[in-house]
Amino acid sequence: MNKLREIIEQTWDNRELLKGQEAQNAIKEVIELLDKGGLRVAEPDGNDWKVNEWVKKAVVLYFPIQKMQTIEVGPFEFHDKMKLKTNYEELGVRVVPPAVSRYGAFLAKGVIMMPSYVNIGAYVDSGTMVDTWATVGSCAQIGKDVHLSGGVGIGGVLEPLQAAPVVIEDGCFIGSRCIVVEGVRVRKEAVLGANVVLTKSTKIIDVSGDAPVEYRGEVPERSVVIPGSYTKEFSAGNFNVPCALIIGKRKASTDLKTSLNDALREYNVAV
């Protein structure tokens, strides 16, 4: 890994090296490791996450060394630089047509992809459902037993290039049409109600106690979150600005599915 990292870092600083076989082979090896789950753009580090910047750089460098090609899948035709992921039966992944995952994304055993999209560098762990028209962006990290509901948009890091990937930890439920971008982290077993939008600058306000508590860039564990707004003063007047409201916590239960259903009912959260 140290040798691979050294080659990738050197190539990142000197793009002329992309013409050489050593650099190309190193980049392709990193993408293969990502595809098989042997390497991740970000990984758990205690209670935090460690971003492997050099791996993300390898993903970016993969694009210029790939040539455009026509890909035919039955009556469908694509024209792109990236291969599509294959061997789903061997991987133990259910893929409902016309779901698509790019080569270089890792899908663990037990993942279900409804008609949806998973981009290169992403990591989707076991038991997770990527529901209809949900998108998992480049290098996003999705934990075990997560439900990404219909139309969810999980942002990537490549366009434009960003420092940290979005992280959705184990057991989270992300409601319909939610958008999570710019490296936001949603901690374990949190529930986002329908249409919650989270960016790095979005105020996430816990209103479940006697006084509001504000977060940015991170949803605490087991939080139940709904869309909200607050009034902000501008030169042209006062206007409502979107935010996210933490209205409670999921209750402790050995059956997470039961506790999730209880939380959704108790707080009347649309999903």
Image: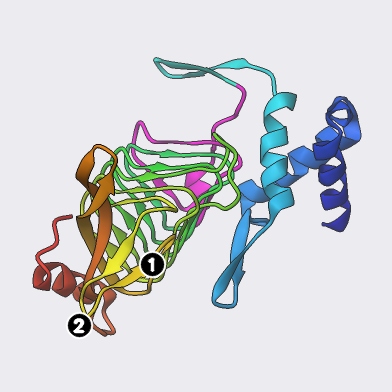
**Residue drawn at (10%, 73%), measured in percent from left and top?**
266
Q: Is residue 34 left or right of residue 156?
A: right
Whether the residues at callouts 2 and 1 have beta carbons within 8 Å, the answer is no
> Looking at the image, which is closer to me, 198 or 156?
198
Q: Position of residue 69 (x, y in %)?
A: 61, 16
Secondary element under disc 2, as helix, strand or loop, is: loop
**Which image quadrant: the C terminus?**
bottom left
Answer few, some or many: residues within 10 Å of disc 2's Cα (few below 14, many 20 plus, some between 14 and 19): few
Q: CA distance from mark 2 to mark 1?
A: 16 Å
Residue denoted by label 1: 215
**Residue drawn at (43%, 47%), measured in percent from left and top?**
181
Q: Position of residue 261 (x, y in %)?
A: 16, 70
**Residue drawn at (88%, 31%), measured in percent from left and top?**
17
Secondary structure mainly formed by the magenta segment: loop
Structure colour scheme: rainbow
Secondary element under disc 1, as helix, strand or loop, is: strand
Q: Quadrant of residue 29?
A: top right
Residue denoted by label 2: 210
Note whether 75 is above or below 44 in the view shown.
Answer: above
Residue type at the position of mark 2: Asp
Magenta residues, start to end: 81-108
Note whether 62 is above or below 126 in the view shown.
Answer: above
Q: Is residue 19 magenta?
A: no
Q: Is residue 92 left or right of residue 18?
A: left
Residue type at the position of mark 1: Tyr
> Looking at the image, which is closer to me, 1 or 83?
1
